[in-house]
Image (cartoon, rainbow, N blue to C red):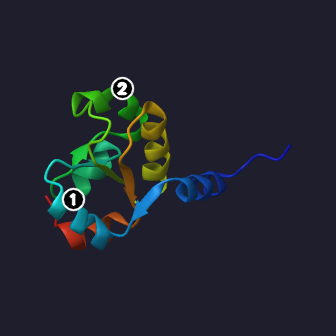
Amino acid sequence: MNLKTLQEIVAETKASVHCLTPQAARELLANNADALVIDVREPGEVAEKRVAGTINIPRGVLEMKITEHTTDPDRPILLHCATGGRAALAAASLERMGFNSVSVIDCSCDDLIAHLGDA
């Protein structure tokens, strides 16, 4: 048996979750005032640069902390990280938990800041 690389796992996961461009994310947010944008990077990364309007819940504790922010399975949840990999893995996990409207903003943090602003 060959072990899969992280890149292979992320690519497979991205293919199975809903991904948005930064432009599409901005449009979705303009039409959904209750949407959550969750940054799944580590707190140290967020301290260096943060996208406006985001909530930081690190990938490692997302499943434990998400219900502090929503228990509505249909509330739109947009996830982002530094490059989209952790966000994709987080999206798959939230879908397994029963959240129905989960999307990954598939871009770099800098690209997302260019579209949504910084905090």
Query: What residue sits 30% from the left and 46% below the top?
Result: 44
Q: Is 35 drawn above or below residue 15 in the view shown?
A: above
Query: What residue sits 26% from the left and 43% below the top?
Result: 75
Label ID, residue 51: 1
Tag 1, which secondary structure? Answer: loop
Q: Quadrant of residue 24?
A: bottom left
Eye-nearest disc, 1 or 2: 2
Q: Is 52 drawn above or below residue 65 in the view shown?
A: below
Query: What residue sits 30% from the left and 32% below the top?
Result: 66
Query: What residue sits 26% from the left and 34% below the top?
Result: 72
Q: In the image shown, does 55 or 35 lie closer to the viewer?
A: 35
Residue 71 x, y percent position in the rendering: 27, 30
For the residues labelled 1 and 2, say whether their Cβ atoms are less than 8 Å apart: no
Tag 2, which secondary structure? Answer: helix
Residue 55 x, y percent position in the rendering: 22, 45
Residue 82 x, y percent position in the rendering: 39, 59
Residue most extreme to the right:
1
Task: Classify the position of the C terminus by image quarter.
Answer: bottom left
Q: Mark 2 or mark 1, which is nearer the start of the sequence?
A: 1
Q: Tell me: 110 left or right of 83.
A: left
Q: Tell me: 76 left or right of 84.
A: left
* Distance Cα–Cα, label 1 vs label 2: 22 Å
As shown in the figure, which amino acid type bears the numbered disc 2? Answer: Met
Q: Quadrant of residue 118?
A: bottom left
Q: Callout 1 environment at 10 Å: few (<14), some (14 to 19), or many (20+)?
A: many
Residue marked by disc 2: 64
As shown in the figure, which amino acid type bears the numbered disc 1? Answer: Val
Q: Quadrant of residue 112?
A: bottom left
Label ID, residue 17: none
Q: Callout 2 environment at 10 Å: few (<14), some (14 to 19), or many (20+)?
A: few
Residue 92 x, y percent position in the rendering: 49, 44
